[in-house]
Every structure is written in structure tokens, then in C-alpha cells.
Amino acid sequence: GEDVEQSLFLSVREGDSSVINCTYTDSSSTYLYWYKQEPGAGLQLLTYIFSNMDMKQDQRLTVLLNKKDKHLSLRIADTQTGDSAIYFCAEILFISSGSARQLTFGSGTQLTVLP
Amino acid sequence: EAQVTQNPRYLITVTGKKLTVTCSQNMNHEYMSWYRQDPGLGLRQIYYSMNVEVTDKGDVPEGYKVSRKEKRNFPLILESPSPNQTSLYFCASRNGHNSPLHFGNGTRLTVT
């Protein structure tokens, strides 16, 4: 089956940069997403990148997309304790039964920010 | 406020006792979906619905049913719950193929 892969855990010191990596499967994915899940809450959209872009920056967040290697990364600058959460990357895939598209998620990366 | 609302937030039940988890969205979204989240497995899709009266199986539909009689509601039904259905469940909706999903806050289900 299709797999979106992420490392399960990442620990960084407060103030350092965090880089969360993801490899996806479908080169025809139009959008790639990063979601953040805080404890006890649902997933919230953090940022996304359109597939014709290489980079997108939004304040402390930088998304890099390498289409050749099907590699997506999320960099969080000046990581704070409030950034501790699970981060999911997701890609849109066409499903075989028609033109509908489904969002497929990675396993999530648990980011722990140490004081 | 635009939101996806799931109920209940927490549920403990016994094997074989039918239960329903409700999901409602107030954004007039056509697409709704149910996921379960398990450690190390990320989110796996159970069922989805492209519109009213249109539902399809996701990756892990066994043991679940859904219905979509109205646009805003998409209940998840477990006719005979089993312990392997102990999980964290999320309902989500979106508007359009490439739009991001909006998630509910989750329902933590324990089946003993």
C-alpha cells in the first residue's frame, strides 16, 4: 500500500531549530500538508505547500519540498515548549475507484522540546 | 464558530454492546471522513462520504458502519465492538478536493 513515512520521535532544546522530515509516495500529489496535534486535541492544519513550490515560509515555519526525492520537511525556528506536539505530514492521493482524492497521513513525529 | 463536533469525547464500553459516535459539522462541507489513530500507525481512514447518501470504505472499515442522511452529520456505528477497536477516533470534513481537512477533537473509545 501507499506509505507516508516519518520518524516517530524528535527531541530538541528550547531555542534550537527543529527539522521534521517526511517522505511521500505520489509524485502527482498537488498539495502536501503539515498538521499539528497537541495533547488531547484534534489535528490542526499548520501549513501546506503546493507541489509547484520548493519552499514556503510562514513566520517561524519553513517548509521545503524536494519533488525529485519525494521529501518534505518542516523546520521550526527558535523552538518553544509550546511547540511540543505530534506533527503529521499528509499527501493527497487519487483513489483507484474514481477521481476522488484522499488525504493519507504519516505516522506522526512526536516533538519534545527540552528546557 | 466553524467546527467539527464529535460526541462523546470519552467512552468506555464492553464487548458486543452497540454504540454510536456522532459527528456534526457546520461548514456545509460535502466531504466527511472518520479516522482512527493508534500509536505508531498514524491516522487510518475508516469510512468517508463524498456527499449525502454516498459513503465508501477507507483503509480499515471492518467492524464499522456509517450513514450520511444529512449533509452535516456523519455518525460512526460499532454494531458489536471488540477490544481491538479501542482507539482514538477523529471525524473530519473538508470542502473541495484539495482543501485541508478540519478535524473534531476526538473520541477516545475503550472496549473491555
Image (tube, coloured by chain):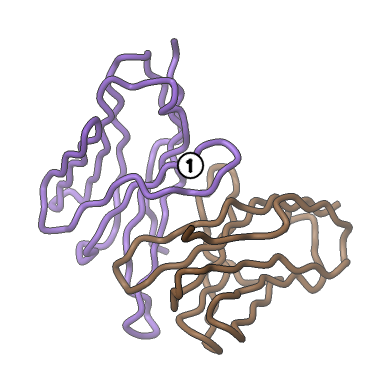
Chain colours: A purple, B brown
How many callouts does the rendering have?
A: 1
Residue at mark 1 = A37
- Please indicate whether residue A54 sits to the left or right of residue A95 in the image: left
| x and y percentages locating residue A96 in the rendered image | 37, 80
| x and y percentages locating residue B99 in the rendered image | 32, 65
Asked if residue B25 is positioned above or below residue A41 in the image, the reply reads below
Subunit under mark 1: A
Residue, x 55% and y 56% (percent of image)?
Answer: B104
| Label 1 neighbour load within 10 Å: few <14, some 14-19, many 20+ | many
Residue sticking out furthest to the front: B1
Asked if residue B32 is positioned above or below residue A15 in the image, the reply reads below
Q: Quadrant of residue A7?
A: top left
User: Depth check: B11 or B16 in front?
Assistant: B11
| x and y percentages locating residue B22 in the rendered image | 68, 67
Residue, x 25% and y 24% (percent of image)?
Answer: A77
Q: Amino acid at mark 1?
A: Gln
Residue, x 33% and y 22% (percent of image)?
Answer: A79
User: Depth check: A18 or B85 in front?
Assistant: A18
Residue sticking out furthest to the top: A115
Residue, x 44% and y 14% (percent of image)?
Answer: A114
- Please indicate whether residue B29 sits to the left or right of residue B53 in the image: left
- Please indicate whether residue B31 sits to the left or right of residue A33 in the image: right
Q: Secondary structure at mark 1?
A: strand
Asked if residue B30 is positioned above or below residue A47 in the image, the reply reads below
| x and y percentages locating residue B6 in the rendered image | 64, 60
